[in-house]
Amino acid sequence: MNGGTMMELLKVHGSGNDFFILDEKNLESPLNDQQLSSLAQKVCDRKQGLHGGADGILLVTKSDLTSQAAEKMRVINSDGSEASMCGNGIRTVARYLSSKNQQTDFKIQTMYADLEVKKENEFAPGVKVFSAEISPVSFAAKDLKMHFPKKNQLLDQSLPELAPGFKFSAVAVPNPHLITFVDHQQLIGPKLGEIASYLNDGKNPYFPDGVNVSFVEVLTKDKIFVRTYERGVGFTNACGTAMSAASLIYVMLYPHNINLEQRLTVINPGGMVKTIVHQRTDGAYWISLIGNATFVARVTVAQPAALAGDFSQATWQATGEQAAYEKFVRGLDSEF
Ligand SMILES: N[C@@H](CCC[C@H](N)C(=O)O)C(=O)O
């Protein structure tokens, strides 16, 4: 990537959860938070944005002095809000930094933690894979910014005031997730959208800052399907932290099906990942999230034009990797 007034972006995805990676090093001058938020809204817009938009921007910056990592990832949702973590995104940033710095096993700083990332074997020819540590994990209402009267945490509990007939669990990994196990009709039905859009309206008393909401269907003992409505975005093809959160809650609620340290297959509308739930000696949980890190295209756009939301002169150079990914997903369809 070059400097100058051209902005260079990398279009990427993990399980079809798509982003533009923007490396601050390549900008003439760093963007302030307001410019970054406004850029994300413009670039990611699915109708007027850059080449069909995206679910967010992943900003790569130099790490803070307190961090052991060399670089930091910031996650800006398509509505311009900032999230503390992105499980699908960090794998693509890991791949980007891995080839830039010639490393295969290293740490990336995120808002609350330095997280371990690692190059893994390809899922299929041309489908590059990275794993990421998902942590820290908390069930505390204060970390979730969750307000249900007399509930300091939520593990498989009814919330009739929110949605009668469902049982909810909440976990921050560290971004907030609300998880419920459902049957297939509920998984594909309208209820997820109804609950999640209410909880992300900015006015509700339960999650005033919003929450990522997932419906989970158990397919077999070691295979679940996760459908997610993301805070700051809406329905996405997949959410890596949601699949990690769902895997943890699955291990806790269904110990007769799956245990700690066992590999779980997580199917999502955009593809598939593998997860492993771990517990440290101090009792803290963490999750390994293993999945594709696909580079779709290299993009250039003049920085002032991008900030103004004008993408008419942007260039788009496809990597050719998407075809391999689509072939891999077609193979999953026949398998499941
Ligand atoms: N898609 C991401 C999560 C992105 C942040 C989320 N929308 C939030 O606001 O917490 C993932 O793969 O984890």
Image (cartoon, helix red, strand yellow):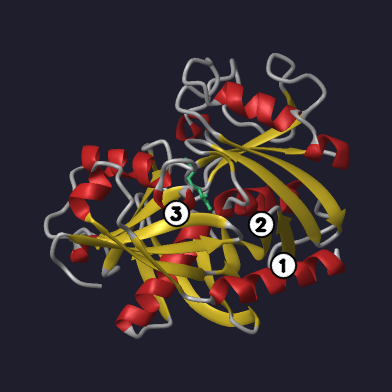
Spatial CA distance of label 3 from label 2 is 19 Å
Direction from residue 143 to residue 123 in the image, left or right: right
Direction from residue 150 to residue 184 in the image, left or right: right
Q: Is residue 144 visible?
A: yes
The amino acid on which the numbered mark 1 sits, given as a three-letter code, is: Val
Which numbered mark, 3 or 1, is in the foreground of this view? Answer: 3
The amino acid on which the numbered mark 2 sits, given as a three-letter code, is: Gly
- Asked if the residue at tag 1 contacts the one at tag 2, i.e. Cβ–Cβ closer than 8 Å, the answer is yes
Q: Position of residue 286 (x, y in %)?
A: 55, 58
- Badge 3 marks a residue whose secondary structure is helix
Q: Position of residue 57 (x, y in %)?
A: 38, 51
Q: Sequence-wise, which precedes: disc 2 or disc 1?
A: 2
Q: Is residue 283 visible?
A: no
Q: Which residue: 85% across, 57% down?
A: 257
Q: Position of residue 164 (x, y in %)?
A: 78, 19
The amino acid on which the numbered mark 3 sits, given as a three-letter code, is: His
Q: Sequence-wise, which precedes: disc 3 or disc 1?
A: 3
- Mark 1 — residue? 329
Q: Residues within 10 Å of mark 1 (few under 14, many from 20)?
A: some
Residue 157 position (above or below residue 301): above
- Residue 167 versus residue 21: which sits nearer the camera? 21
Residue 48 position (above or below residue 146): below
